[in-house]
Amino acid sequence: MDPRTFLPLPPLDFQVLLDLAAGPKHAYGLATPVEGTRDDVRLELGSLYRILARLSSDGLIEETEPRRDESRPDARRRYYQLTALGRAVAGAEARRLEGLIRTARAQRLLVPRRK
Amino acid sequence: MRVGPLVVRAALRAFPAPFREKYAREMLEDFEHHWRNTQRSRDRTWLLVRTVPNLLTSAIAEHRRSSFAGSAPMYPVRREGRAMLHLTRDLRHAARALRGQPLLTSFLVMTLAVGIGATTAVFTVVNSVLLEPLHLPQSGNLVAIWGRFDPESGFNYPRFVLSAPEVVDYRRETQTLGGVAAWQPITVTVRGGGAEPDRVPAAAVTGNFFSLLRVSPERGRTFTPDEDRPQHARVAMLSAGYWRSRFGADPDIVGRTVPLNGEETTIVGVMPPGFTYPSTSTSIWIPLGIDPASPGSRKSHSLRAIGRLREGVSLQQARAELATIMAGWKARYPDVHTGHYLFIRPLLDDTVGSVRPALLALLVATAFVVLIGCANLAGVLMSRGEGRTREMSIRAALGARRGELIRLTLAEAGILSLFGGTLGLLLAWIGVRGLLAVDPSSIPRSSEIAIDGRVPAFALAISMATAGISGVLPALRGAAAAARGTLRESSHATTAAGGRQRVRRALVAAEVALSVVLVLGAGVMLRGFNRLLATDPGFRPAGLVTASIALPSRDYPAAEQVEALYSSVLDRLRRAPGVAGASAASNVPLLNEAGVWDFEIEGRPAPPAGEMAWNAAAVIARRDYARTVGIPVERGRFFRSQDDARSMMVTVISDTMAKRFFPGRNPIGHRIRVKGVTAPAGWMTIVGVIGDVHDVGLEAAPRPTYYIAQPQVPSMGEGPYRQMAIVIRVSGSPDAAIAALRSVVHDLDPRLPLFDIESMDAVLDQSVARPRFTTTLLVVFAIVGILLGAGGIYGVLAYTVATRTPEIGIRRALGAPATRILSDVMRGGLWPVCLGLAIGLLLSYWTSRALATEVLGVSGTDLTTYAVAVLAVFTVALVSCAVPAARALRVSPLAALRSE
């Protein structure tokens, strides 16, 4: 399947794919990104699970075997990871955005931030 | 604090089933994790406010999506979800519009939150008290069994306890009930365990009591059939709470003997925690000891009874069978069962039936508050819709369909209602605590009141209904206006279009009507309650305290011993400092109800069968009782110390008794005798008439009452009367008086516990706790209602007047006098108000009457209440009209015309 049929990705979908690019994560981990690393839009519970359901059924992410979470030994959690297609789609979206950014620079919309 | 996860659990139900099955558990766990990591309650509130609407909108979106999917894979390729896109777009658009007017938005959200919060809080109580089954296994088929005396029997008691032979016969003859158990509330004195003697509430029960309720003991066993016989060795069971508090949860309690009422009694079992039937204070159960072969007199009624419907048997079938059984009894015992019947009703009704009218009235009142909130919201949405007519028309001209325009308004209503509902749920959670703080003891099962899964679902349903009710009319009107192509009309019209004007008038009329009903209802309750409080109880409760003692027959077998103890307790007490007077009686007004005893009047034939029997409440009292509690002596005298076992028997009767049985005559000197007493000395001469006392409740008429001197009770041929309430008129502190009584009793017999220690002020207060609870809440709801209503009426009227500003400008410019314009504007604004008042008054005619009689037990509607309520609502409306009208007049004609 051509990754480009999925473009443009909704921003939150892209954000989830990016988070998973670093390695498998469970939903709770996706909802609580490390403080200060990015100024993300916060993912509310309902939206997050809808995105996970959608990305799964589109075949962009897949569930791994449930396993124990070190921080919560009581619960077995579903982990999600990128599929090859998902990785390709995220890459294609990133390239698309990169193209847009390049245009923005060319139009002098994007100037380096002053310290 | 479990409320957050509960709310989220409820919200998760909104998702389509396949989604829910896959993700709901994990989502809830995630939320619980967030919840635990959030400590401050403010942050938790914020978390909830963020999460719940998001869940609900996600759930709606997911429904749209899955309904589109049809038989295709569960999550089809994204771009097919067009409807979902519409919905999210609508919601986003609506949210943006609402964010643009934060003040208005927060006012509306608060309005809805208050209404939904109040309704949900009251629903929580209704849910726990009226709807939730009793905490007994399979309690749905438990029934209460009562007797009923119709006037034909010579008595008139719609609900009365049973006699032992009735219980035994019913148990033997019934096929529809799987069992019939009986019990009787008692109090027992417990000694031993190294502590002071204790007087605790207990129940004497039949052997099948526990098996009928299907509750097994936690330790030991229940009673054997053998133990439920008279003269059997004494055994008892303990409640878990009492086992812990009195016996320190002694693991070897089963088999121990404990002195109960002075008799060594073996503890055979301990019931599980939480089992406290028949009352939450029941600490001990002992066998009732009915002998089925000779159960005693059929006319001696003292037992409460319960039964369990057999599997598959309906209440109607059991009632039909009972009617057949009663016919048989009437044939066999015509002298007992003429006009006397048994009846059954569900145990839940029996437990909480008395509070149902009050709770339902409160629920209706809160529903009115919600409706007022709906009207407010509808009014604002209408006005906003009109302000946006131009926008709508452009959208329509650009090809937006009617449906989309309707959806936009509904989306606004939906967002506001959801936020209002979420906030309302939090308010309800606080409100329930508030409700219980007002007075928990007056509601049965109040300890069971809690928020369960049904409550958030209810709040959600109310929010949805609110959105629907308040959104649909403005949505339709707005879309219609847009469809007509009102681009032209929109801003150049000097008067508002007729149709919209009508809708707005209807809104004002509805708000006024609802407010009138609410305010009048609260007013009637308040007046009734004040009348209740102003009722003279017939005695002086201030500075009166009471405490009871009971002498065990084992320690005080002889009448002389009983008499000696009571007279020395009272003699010593009267000399104690801080005691202005002291006496004793078998029953204290409002605290424990005196039994009704039949009597004969000397020289008059007894009433024939079919006529009302002669009877009255009988109180056994000692000298000085009337003076101590403050009942005025109207004729003759009260008991004196000379009225003892050796002198002629005397009695004192109440005013009502004198009027009923000796109309137009002086009763003093006549003789009466308690029916059944055959001793020749049993005739009692009436020596005095004293004032009436509201002994069963301020709302109930005083009962005819006669007083018998305690020292003379043995003259009737009966044993001495051993349990008395000591009453003390204090001149100092009540606590000191009780302490004095305690030390006096302790000096005379350290084994005697004091119980039922009360100040009569508190007793009087407690007797009106339930009407106070209902009245307080109704008044609060009415105030909230009228404030919200005032806001809404003001908003709508002010807007109407504001739309007339250009018209006013033109008229002023043409030279119309200001007073003329003012009266015009006021007339236009006030006639829907008057219509609303009329409708409200019409509705109130029924509602306030029902309130007064069903909830408060007082009758009558009084004009003052009506006048005040109407005046209050009308004033609010008048101000709402006059202020914007005056403002419009102050605007110079030029500016008014230029405001185009």
Image (tube, coloured by chain):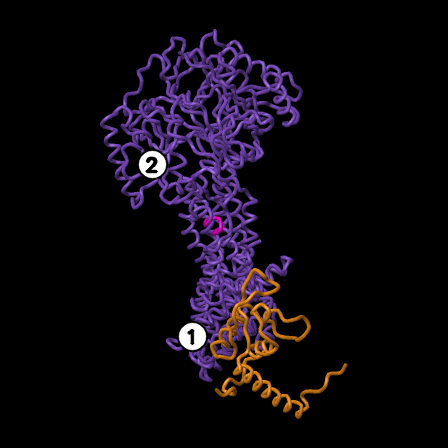
Chain colours: A orange, B purple
Label 2, label 1: how far apart the Cα atoms are = 54 Å
Residue B645: tell me if it is visible: yes
* Residue B584 position in % (x across, y down): 53, 20
Under mark 1, the amino acid is: Met
Q: Is residue B24 one of those drawn in magenta?
A: no
Magenta range is B122-127
Label 2 element class: strand
Which residue carries the number 2 mark?
A: B179
Residue B382: tell me if it is visible: no
* Foreground of the two, A41 or B509: A41
Q: Residue at x 54, y 22 (%)?
A: B549
Q: Is residue A96 above or below residue A17?
A: below
Q: Is residue B169 above or below residue B428?
A: above
Which residue carries the number 1 mark?
A: B74
Q: What's the chain of the residue with tag 1?
A: B
- Label 1 neighbourhood size at 10 Å, few (<14), some (14-19), many (20+)? some
Q: Is residue B608 above or below residue B270?
A: above
Q: Residue at x 48, y 9 (%)?
A: B645
* Residue B286 position in % (x across, y down): 45, 28
Label 1 element class: loop
Q: Main secondary structure of the magenta part?
A: helix
* Foreground of the two, B606 or B755: B755
* Foreground of the two, B510 or B470: B470
Q: What's the chain of the residue with tag 2?
A: B
Q: Earlier in the sequence, mark 2 or mark 1?
A: 1
Under mark 2, the amino acid is: Gly
